[in-house]
Image (cartoon, rainbow, N blue to C red):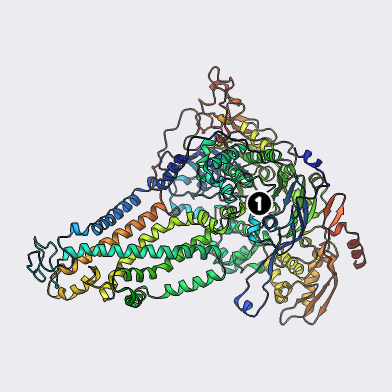
Amino acid sequence: MSMPALEPVAPGASLGRQRGVRRLVAPFRDANGVSKAVVWVGAFITTAFVVLAIFAPVFAPYEFDSFRTDDGVRFAKQEAPSAQHPFGTNVMQTDVLSRVIFGSRTAIQVVALALVVSLVVGLPLGLISGYRGGPVDRGLVLVMDALIAFPSLLFAIVIAFLLSDTFGRGVVTAALAISIVYIPQYFRVVRNHVISVREEPFVEAARAIGAPPRTVIRRYVFQNVVQNVPVIATLNAADAILTLAALGFLGYGIQPTEAAEWGYDIKRAISDAGAGIWWTGLYPGLAIVLLVTGLTLLGEGLNDVLNPVIRRRKTVPVAFPRRPEIGEGNEGAP
Amino acid sequence: MKRESEAIATAAPPLLDVHDLRTHFALRGSFAGRLLGRDAGSVKAVDGVSFALRTGEVLGLVGESGSGKTTLARTVLGLVEATGGSIRFDGEELVGMSERDLRRHRRRAQIVFQDPHASLNPAMDLLTAIGHPLKIHGVATEEGALRRAVSDALEHVGLTPVERFLHSFPADLSGGQKQRAAIARAIILGPDLLIADEPVSMLDMSVRAKILELMLTLKDEFDLTYMYITHDLATAKFFCDRIAIMYLGRIVELGPAEQIYDDPKHPYTASLLRAIPEPDPSRSVPRDVPRGEIPDAVAPPLGCRFHPRCPRAFEVCGWESRDLRTLLETRWTRLSEDDYEAERRVIGDLDALDEPALDCVLPAADGHFPDDAMSVFEALRSDEPEDPFFKGVAEVGTDPRGVRVRFNDAMDPRDLDLDGTRVQCHLHDREALEAARRAG
Amino acid sequence: MNGPVLSVRDLRVWFGTPGAPVRAVDGVTFDLVAGETLGLVGESGCGKSTLGRSLMGLLPEGAACDGEILYDGANVVDLATRELRSIRGPDVAMIFQEPMTRLDPLMTIEDHFLETLRTHESDLSKAEMRRRSLDALGGMGIPPTRFGQYPHEFSGGMRQRIMIALALVLRPRIVIADEPTTALDVLVEAQILSILSDLRRNFDTALLLITHNLGIVAEACDRVAVMYAGEIVESGPSADVFRSPAHPYTRELLASIISLRTESLRSIPGAPPDLREPPPGCRFHPRCPAAMQVCPSLSPVPVQVGTGTVRCWLHGPEAMIPAGGTAPLEHRTLEVADEA
């Protein structure tokens, strides 16, 4: 086939990227007001906690385990909220506010790490399993279904327990334990989506132009499957926070000396409740509720905005203009 | 344009030579069946297809859904694995070729799909999508060269000004524009063979002409050879040099386009032609449409596959037990409910007739005599004595179980050459007509 | 024949969007007479499906209706949901395009029929219901032995026939068929069309056949209405319209059809307009080979031409065309990029 050479055209690659960005942003622009509000609120809360987590030493008045001031004066035990300790102190003579702030650092660290591990393992497995099918797929599905069948909290406890010998009882163990619980979920969602995308004509077209399987998976299947992931990831993160807190509550979570953790604090606060000491349990509890809510709102909001099936565009209500003089169709009905 | 291609040298070997090609999809069957090693059967989508395609020719593959035409196209490209037979492309055997070699083969044979809205990757802009074949096969990888090649292809398919389309995504385009883009992607590697699978059936009427015109222009410009798959005989007549009519996995008629339309030899072809809706108000809806529908490809009818629906079937066309069931059930749709109940009561389990056989029993129900079942059969015969079915019945008699029906031996239709048209039909087979005379 | 069974007067159906509304149906007027088949024909995006759905009140959220759909003295546009539901079925029935997705896969055919009959004619005995169902199915060629089977056990053509039987078992006065044969092969299509053709003979039903296929309209419909960009541009007895089309769009559409007698290809330049911003005046004028100066400025009025009606300035009324309006219009060359 003869193709006459064209003049090299001015670089239009930036135009392509512009259009690409516009495509990503488009659903947000068109979205219904309620969905957008939900996304903003969720994003704001989540970001607030992330900022707290990153800049914990800046925001927190004390270390998470400090039980005395710089001068060596010990903190009071279970002191009610005051100017010195805005959230009060707990039975270990540590500042509740600092523990809440450092607790958010722990939570964000663990959940972020768990997310990354789950994605790195679950996503490729789901892609390959869904695309290839056959005995590999059947085997993996069997394994993943078995994993899902375990009660997730129990499973996390067992894994945390087993891993604690090798990795100690820190952030890494907790993150790994949680990630193993969520890997099957990513696997399943990605695999199901791949199976439906795999039958699409454009994937067959990719094979028809001679693309090898890894190119087909990477450029044709993955790009169309990955839109689901942010939603699943945020919703899983919310669930992971709760699992981490539960681990801590039951005593299988992070070693108290290693980091502050909300679940552990709540557990210690149970005995306080009877004595009328409310600040040791309330604040960690509130933190959990707030972060989980933030993540959930973000996830659900993203789903409403991005999911083409359920998204509702904001529509301007229709107002019929007054009928024009000419072009009226009232006479001469056929 | 079409006429010129007939002057192609017939001495040159064909570009594509398909011989007795078979593509069967195995059915999974029940779990118990698989455990016991029972064969669940297979869908015989393509079941013995032979044809040759010369360079520069346009071959139309016409058939309804279930005919196997789509599977045939995919097998020729290697997108689906053939079960048996041979496909020689420019001398090279494709059946049994490794996946890697097949990918290499795809530089020379390309396809345009039916649904323009689904055959382009929604996440790729046109520059990436149309340029991708070049990247995959290493023809052009550097950005400037890719851009030039894609711009050129866009110009050839009429998507100008090129700047407007290079960075568009499929969602920004109309159906016709998407199909043009798909064609650009298919021709950019300079293939020899282009398979078009119903390229215009999902487009509006006024757009079809534009796309077909484009395809004809490209054919002349780039010396393409086309395989044009469709169920629409009207566009096939306009577009193709030769036409193959497919039914249930076989080619039943193959010949020059003019001959197919002026003088169809196979009753199926004739009925397809009669059924095409024409914007001519003096015509009315055809009343002599063949009865029934295209059957399941898992267990095709015995003998000639079209015989249950054929208005001209006769003794040796392959009448069998399942036809008896169909006839009986059709009769019952016309009876009043009381009459139907009366007859139904007398007949036993009709599933006994589902096993294809030339010798079967219409069972009488428990507590009823075979004579009762026979009277139902006689009523059936007296209502429609002219039905071709009865030509196929060799012998009828009662039997302790019910009515025993024996059919004439079924003959498998074979390829017959009639004046340049190849047909698979007993009506033109002297041997079959002889056998029928003897049986009748 | 009596007066029309259904009268549509100046119907507008607009869809709300983030921006300007989509004017899917923009001032449509026609009548449906008992025992007659009216073919509503047009290309994709012309609004014919929306029109069909609006007649039954089956529009999605975000759609707004204006105008009159007069049935039995009431205006369907104003009816509440409950009242709409009571006329859907026994009075107006609809046959959809994709029979696969319209039957409940978990219910047998028998269940489908019994549910329909129980809802609308609950005073019938079970035996009578069965008789009616088998009758309807028998008329479609579905044997009574298959009454207890599930939808997936039937082929596409048979499912469409079951749908038609379901629509007819209540003996509605109006049947709206929205592209009933588009998803089917040509032989099955012919079978379905002959069934639909018999409707008017046997049951005096009024049939509105919505399609893009001019061939089936010519063969199966008494009258035809051609739609373009939300308006009916021409209507009349199908024999007359096909023999001598009055509107340039009808002429061009007929010319672009590829039939067995086609010698050369013809197409209509350009593409159907964006219904959010339709062209001013006559909506077809940017693509019309016979456009005049008046066409972009004034919307044409329906005019009686022979046995039919047309909306086209080529047919007047003369009195309404300003001076110089009949001079030909210069077109801007349409690029291929503007084409569909």
Pick the front one: A56 or B81: A56
| Residue B216, x across and y down, in percent | 69, 40
Quarter placement of the N terminus of chain A = top right
Quarter placement of the C terminus of chain A = top right
| Residue C198, x across and y down, in percent | 68, 51
| Residue A279, x across and y down, in percent | 15, 67
Pick the front one: B138 or A153: B138
- Residue at 58% across / 47% down in the picture? B134
- Res. A46 image quadrant: bottom left
Q: Residue furthest top?
A: C323
- Residue at 73% across / 49% down in the picture? B60
Quick check: B109 above or below B158? below
> Disc 1 sits on a residue from what chain?
C
Quick check: C216 above or below A276? above
Q: Secondary structure at mark 1?
A: helix
Whether residue B97 is visible to the viewer of this picture, yes or no, is yes
Q: Which residue is mark 1?
A: C196
The kind of residue tagged 1 is Leu
Horizontal side, residue C183 vs residue A307: left or right: right
Pick the front one: A302 or A9: A9
Whether residue C122 is visible to the viewer of this picture, yes or no, is no
Horizontal side, residue C229 vs residue B198: left or right: left
| Residue A257, x across and y down, in percent | 21, 72
Horizontal side, residue B225 vs residue B386: left or right: left
- Res. C110 image quadrant: bottom right
Q: Residues within 10 Å of mark 1 (few under 14, many from 20)?
A: many
Quick check: C256 above or below A79? above
